Amino acid sequence: MNKELRVDPTVCSGHGLCAELLPELITLDEWGYPIVARGAVPGSLDRHVRRAVTDCPALALKLLPVS
Amino acid sequence: MTYGTTVPYPAPSPGPRGSHPAGTAPARTGPGAPGDLPRLLPEHGAVPVDLRTHLSRHAAPPYFGQPGKLIPVLEAAGLTGRGGAAFPVYRKLEAVAEARTQPVVIGNGAEGEPASDKDKSLLWISPHLVLDGLQLAAEAVGSQAVALYVHRNTRLQERLRAAVAERAAAGVDVAAVEIIDAPPRFLAGEESALASRISGGPAMPRFKPPRVFERGVVGRPTLVHNVETLAHIALIARYGPAWFRAAGTPGEPGSMLCTLHQADGRRDVVETGLGTPLRDLLRLDGTQAVLSGGYHGAWVPAADAARMTLSNEDLQAAGAFVGAGVLVALPADCCGIAETARVARYLALESAGQCGPCFNGLPRIAAALDEVAGPRPDPRAVTDMIRWAGLVEGRGACHHPDGTTRFVRSALHVFREEIRNHSAGRCVDPAREPFLPLPADTALDAADWN
Amino acid sequence: MNGITHSTALWYASRATGVVSLLLLTGVVLLGVLVNRQGRLPGLPRFVVTGLHRNLSLLGVVFVAIHVITAVLDPYVSIQIAAVVVPFASSYKSLWLGLGAISLDLVLALILTSLARARISRRFWRSLHWLSYAAWVSALGHSLFISTDLQSGVLLYMTIACILAVLAAVIWRVAHAGREIPREERAAATLAMMSPRGAPRAPGSPRDGARRRAPENVR
């Protein structure tokens, strides 16, 4: 997949699900907000990434073309 | 709610080389000799230029008759945005001109930076240059939806409305111009905040993509230009790229407006060519450091500044940049850390409160700076501050966190001696009057963002 | 004899699956409030809350489907198929059945929009999702009055428990919304938490300080 995972910080409210579902790419900062790894998403994580995007209660995660 | 200090629109001071000459001279028509300054401001005093004077000096705006023709002219001139980002102007126009839906053109006069006066001064003194530029840009991208976004100031907005009406009556304009009110917030002039406000919402930044040139005001492709940029466009369209390039340097051509804060407290707006030595603009004796680029800019030690010119080539090497031309000479008897701490608190309170990293990190950084500005600060304050700076950079919807950390990091470096003094319980002058300008009060209400 | 047994089986199946549907829907509403409040089920990761919320709702649809089909097929009462989704279109207990139809319509709308969540606008999805409360209330009205099953005995206690649970969840949610700090004030609230050495508060501190409880983390 030549897409990058990004979080829209204006809608993210720090639920923290994404870090549980995708620990390879997402960690939480000391305030509970996600730090998302930059760069194209590795193909092996495809399924997990899509799940994280769908499951985010705020729909804050987005798959965008690599900038 | 009042917006802080009133801004007199002062006469550009005649001293420093590169700005306009003092003394009397007959009112001239046309641009004068190439390289002559001023271009945007009138020669003498801060007397506002009315439509008749404007037309007798420059004639009517040279409409091209079809969209797109202006763009190669601007490309040749090498004009970059004067709102702070210095993005090549022709590229923005190209991107919007390519749009398939009807674009919107906005002149951005929302000068949220407390240390900057140049946009207000330009709008007060030379509104017709700005309005010419707006019309020419609208023609270039094929837009009929044009507006000027101006900070909340009744006198200025009335004057602008009168200018627009006068032009409409005289048949100078091809598109109707709306004057839109911007809330007095630091972030109100940010492109996506502007688009959000004009679309009817609060002036709060949005996540990108999409950028405003793709989807901005009410979802339409939007061209946003600083009002000074528009004024330059108005002159380049008349007098050509070569004339524009006669000032400035080959790499950074043209002239620009600067807001100068001298160490003795004087505050002026001057027009100068890019590449002007900083020591010709600011009096550096009795100065310990120079702030370049406003409150999202960076501090530079005075000794270094004395060797630099007003150019990104020089300033970026020192971690600063030209930005919107704010230059502050910090007196030697000021505590640089205390000044930075005051501004950092202001910047933290100007957070839109949308993004977790920003509204959590910036106030903590400001509080830590407050700690370091006091006697015998907790040694963890600096390490905490640096950790938080790393946590907020790049994690907001806009560059507010990044600009704030740039400003703070440069202070930690340039004023490191002062920090050591504070650890030993000494300060250059703890009771000194504050130097850096800030508005009188801050926003705390939803209404303050609308 | 055969016909009556068959009919009775359908009737019982409809009533049983109806009860289970109400329980599942109640569970879904409670879990929905828990997701919104960023709460957790003790000892379990956060994604279990959202996962359970989704899975129970899908399971609920299955039980509602069986409940509806058995009711329609059952010859003892005559319920036209149209009355399943068109409120008040049946002649049999039209009001209470109508509430059931309303609830079913709403649940279908909620499920379909949630399945298409990534493709529709966030604001539209959110506005529609508020109807989940209406769906639950309609389901409750339908269940309570369409027969006397829930009006006595164990099932009555169960129903009261469901009502109290949802009421408590709603109060919890509304109370939080009342305490939540609006965007424009969040930075100031954080700063107020951090004031060092008892320094003077930022100019123009939150006007209604009494309304706020100091949050450990500003959300």
Image (cartoon, helix red, strand yellow):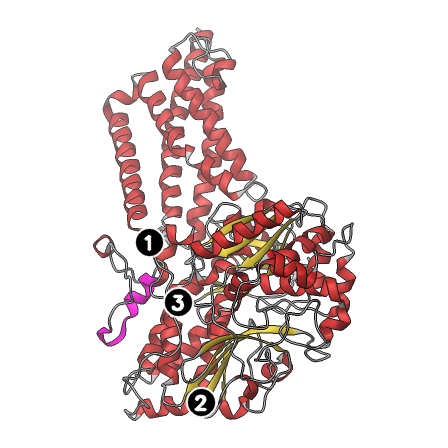
Amino acid under disc 2: Thr
Left or right: residue C159 compared with residue B51: left
Residue segment shown in magenta: C188-199
Could you say where residue A13 lies in the image, as x and y percent from the top left?
43, 55
Badge 2 or badge 3: first in the primary sequence: 2
Mark 2 and mark 1, same subunit? no
Image quarter in which the N terminus of chain B is found? bottom left
Could you say where residue B302 lies in the image, as x and y percent from the top left?
49, 90
> In the image shown, does B188 or A49 lie closer to the viewer?
B188
Left or right: residue B263 compared with residue B126: left
Q: Which residue is mark 3?
A: B348
Amino acid under disc 3: Ala
> In the image shown, does C61 or B351 lie closer to the viewer?
B351
Amino acid under disc 1: Ile
The structure residue drawn at horizontal position 28% and vertical position 29%, both measured from the top left corner, is C159
Q: Nearer the viewer, mark 1 or mark 3?
A: 3
Q: Which residue is mark 2?
A: B287
